[in-house]
């Protein structure tokens, strides 16, 4: 369900994008119809339509007239690229600021990251 | 959904379908009750006059109650279901004219049956001399009296209910008008129970045309004022 | 069929109480609207006038461009259910009330009504006055839905319903709305719970229209600005502030409208935290007795 403060259409759009990035929704896969979405989450279908329209404008979805809404095949890569752009400004910089605020030396942060990388590398093999 | 206003006579059809059978049943129960009463009286005193006719005059209170019920209970529901007040008024008017005629016919039939019974039982079949008809055999006059009684008293019920539906000063007016109608028509028809009027007002023999005029003089203002009150009556939310 | 509903300068007076004061708006058809207002704000009066239950003292209530009051074509098109009433006479049995509706209501879907009666387990043989509050509320909603009126007005019908019933009826309402599009206006105090159903909301206060807007736009217009008091004051200077709260040196101000991406970045740069505001909170502060922000 959705939090009752942020506009719902934005939450829907964010969720669809998250599903696309995670692979839960594949390229050229059909998404639920506005009515199905509305019934499932108990929200007005116009709100769903607004979210879908935004996703179409952002080229995450495309419409096949008379059939429904589909995930754009390029959406996953495009979204991941977007998130890569904001990764440092939105996630890393605030993390660094927080480490400084609570008094964690940055070497510790780096060391932990490296441990994680090594473990992930071992699992790959 | 169709664009037309739909059936303008839906209310009348509904009332004919649901209320008429019920009224027929009520008459049967009434007849049975009067029969029982008759034999109960016979056990104590000898019967010298009609019992049915006085019993019928009591029915005017039922008619009053029915008028109250139509405005208090049915009008709000029917308007809530999409009918207009004007349609309600027209439908109910038609229904009442027919239904009261039907009931009056049944009540006249009852008097005729009483005649038969009295002949068998060798009881004299007399009616009060204040009545419009001199003897129970004058069936057109009997029917006319009964029909007028039902129409007038139902109208009074409608009038009172409409007058008291919302506060705003018109309750007193409705009450006074109702009383005036009662006085005027009681004089004309001698409905019994208000026989004291006969001692206050010496009316003598009113010709039939005069009776008819009095009847209309009672009915028409009653109907007119009731409509004036109903035509924009607010439908309040009476939580069930 | 979707029909436009219009209020044009509506006025309603009871004696010396003004319930509706020059109220005007247009509702293009085919949407679910939320009608929000405090107790006594005029919601029920407005809906009563729109349905032709009351005559306005001034102005006009129109459906499809024609007046409603005493106009059979339009009165057939409206169904107003107020709280737990307007379904029938309290001495009637449920099945009798259903029968009356089926005879008088144009467009009534008896099978749908029966299905809902089954689903919500309303006893058909009981008199309306003997039903529990929850059952009466449910019956009201059932009538509102089964009437399939092009203009369906539901006034506080959720009163007396428990949470599971409300959820079930919201599902029913949505499903039937999607299957049979029409204009639905829901007046309620359960703002946060029901607002996801509304495409647009109207807020009325003291008989006047405060605002009419898309629910989502309204939601986006509120923002809670939190941070050091001086920074908050600097940021909100000149803006519409609905409410301020202080805790020590931290201050939180509810701002209404006018924040675009640039302003949001400014706020973040100033060390301020921007959070969304629930519709219910916005409503409370847009309709304060002192007048609030308009």
Image (cartoon, coloured by chain):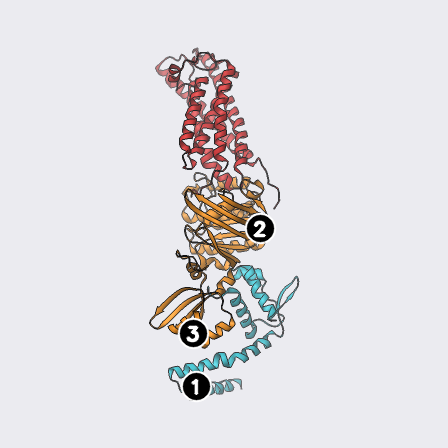
Chain colours: A cyan, B red, C orange
Given the current orientation, which residue lies at the most extreme front position?
Answer: C238
**Subunit of mark 2?**
C
Other-residue count near label 2 (Cα within 10 Å), few / some / many at <14 / 14–19 / ≥20: some
Can residue C271 be seen in this snapshot? yes
Residue tagged 2: C4
Spot occupied by residue C188 in the image (x, y as percentages of width and height): 45, 53
Q: Is residue A63 left or right of residue C190?
A: right
Residue tagged 3: C272
SS class, disc 1:
helix
Spot occupied by residue C94 in the image (x, y as percentages of width and height): 47, 42
**Mark 2 to mark 3: distance in Å?**
44 Å
Q: Compared to B11, does B139 lie above or below?
A: above
SS class, disc 2:
loop
**Subunit of mark 3?**
C
Residue tagged 1: A109
Q: Are marks 1 and 3 in contact (CB under 8 Å)?
A: no
Write down the quadrant of residue B37 in the picture. Answer: top left
């Amino acid at each position: 369900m959705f939090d009752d403060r942020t506009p719902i259409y934005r939450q829907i759009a964010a969720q669809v994008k998250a599903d696309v990035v995670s692979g839960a929704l594949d390229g050229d896969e059909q998404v639920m119809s506005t009515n199905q979405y509305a019934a499932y989450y108990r929200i007005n279908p116009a709100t769903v339509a607004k979210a879908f329209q935004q996703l179409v404008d952002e080229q995450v979805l495309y419409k096949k007239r008379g059939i429904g809404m589909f995930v754009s095949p390029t959406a996953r890569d495009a979204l991941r690229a977007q998130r890569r752009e904001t990764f440092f400004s939105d996630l890393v910089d605030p993390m660094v600021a927080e480490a400084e605020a609570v008094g964690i030396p940055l070497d510790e942060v780096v060391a932990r990251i490296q441990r994680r990388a090594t473990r992930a590398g071992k699992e790959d093999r | 959904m169709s664009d037309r206003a739909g059936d303008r006579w839906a209310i009348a059809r509904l009332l004919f379908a649901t209320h008429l059978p019920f009224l027929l049943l009520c008459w049967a129960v009434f007849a049975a009750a009067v029969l029982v009463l008759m034999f109960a009286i016979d056990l104590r005193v000898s019967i010298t006059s009609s019992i049915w006719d006085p019993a019928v005059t009591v029915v005017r209170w039922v008619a009053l109650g029915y008028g109250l019920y139509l405005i208090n209970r049915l009008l709000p529901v029917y308007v809530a279901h999409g009918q207009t007040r004007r349609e309600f008024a027209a439908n109910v008017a038609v229904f009442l004219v027919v239904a009261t005629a039907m009931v009056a016919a049944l009540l006249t039939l009852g008097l005729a049956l009483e005649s038969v019974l009295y002949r068998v039982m060798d009881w004299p079949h007399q009616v009060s001399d204040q009545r419009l008809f001199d003897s129970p055999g004058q069936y057109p006059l009997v029917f006319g009296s009964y029909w007028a009684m039902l129409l007038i008293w139902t109208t009074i019920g409608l009038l009172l209910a409409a007058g008291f539906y919302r506060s705003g000063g018109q309750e007193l007016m409705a009450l006074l008008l109702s009383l005036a109608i009662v006085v005027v028509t009681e004089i004309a028809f001698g409905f019994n129970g208000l026989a004291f009027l006969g001692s206050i007002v010496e009316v003598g023999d009113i010709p039939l045309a005069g009776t008819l005029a009095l009847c209309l003089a009672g009915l028409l203002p009653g109907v007119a004022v009731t409509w004036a009150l109903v035509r924009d009556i607010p439908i309040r939310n009476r939580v069930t | 069929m979707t029909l436009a509903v219009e209020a044009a300068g509506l006025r309603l007076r009871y004696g010396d109480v003004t319930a509706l004061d020059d109220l005007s708006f247009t509702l293009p058809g085919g949407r679910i609207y939320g009608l929000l207002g405090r107790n006594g704000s005029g919601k029920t009066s407005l809906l009563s006038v729109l349905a032709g239950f009351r005559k306005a003292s001034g102005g006009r209530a129109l459906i499809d461009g024609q007046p409603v009051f005493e106009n059979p074509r339009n009165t057939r098109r409206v169904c107003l259910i107020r709280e737990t009433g307007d379904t029938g006479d309290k001495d009637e049995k449920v099945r009798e009330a259903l029968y009356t509706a089926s005879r008088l209501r144009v467009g009534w879907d008896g099978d749908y009504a029966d299905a809902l009666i089954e689903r919500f387990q309303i006893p058909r043989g009981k008199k309306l006055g003997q039903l529990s509050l929850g059952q009466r509320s449910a019956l009201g909603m059932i009538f509102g839905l089964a009437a399939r009126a092009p203009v369906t007005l539901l006034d506080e019908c959720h009163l007396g319903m428990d949470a599971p019933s409300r959820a079930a009826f919201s599902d029913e309402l949505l499903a039937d709305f999607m299957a049979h599009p029409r204009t639905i206006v829901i007046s309620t105090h359960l703002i946060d719970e029901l607002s996801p159903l509304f495409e647009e909301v109207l807020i009325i206060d003291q008989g006047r229209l405060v605002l009419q807007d898309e629910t989502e736009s309204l939601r986006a217009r509120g923002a809670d600005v939190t941070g050091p008091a001086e920074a908050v004051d600097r940021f909100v200077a000149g803006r519409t502030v609905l409410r301020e709260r202080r805790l020590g040196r931290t201050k939180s101000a509810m701002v209404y409208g006018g924040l675009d991406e640039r302003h949001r970045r400014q706020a973040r740069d100033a060390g301020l935290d921007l959070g969304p505001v629930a519709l219910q909170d916005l409503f409370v502060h847009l309709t304060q007795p002192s007048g609030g922000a308009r």
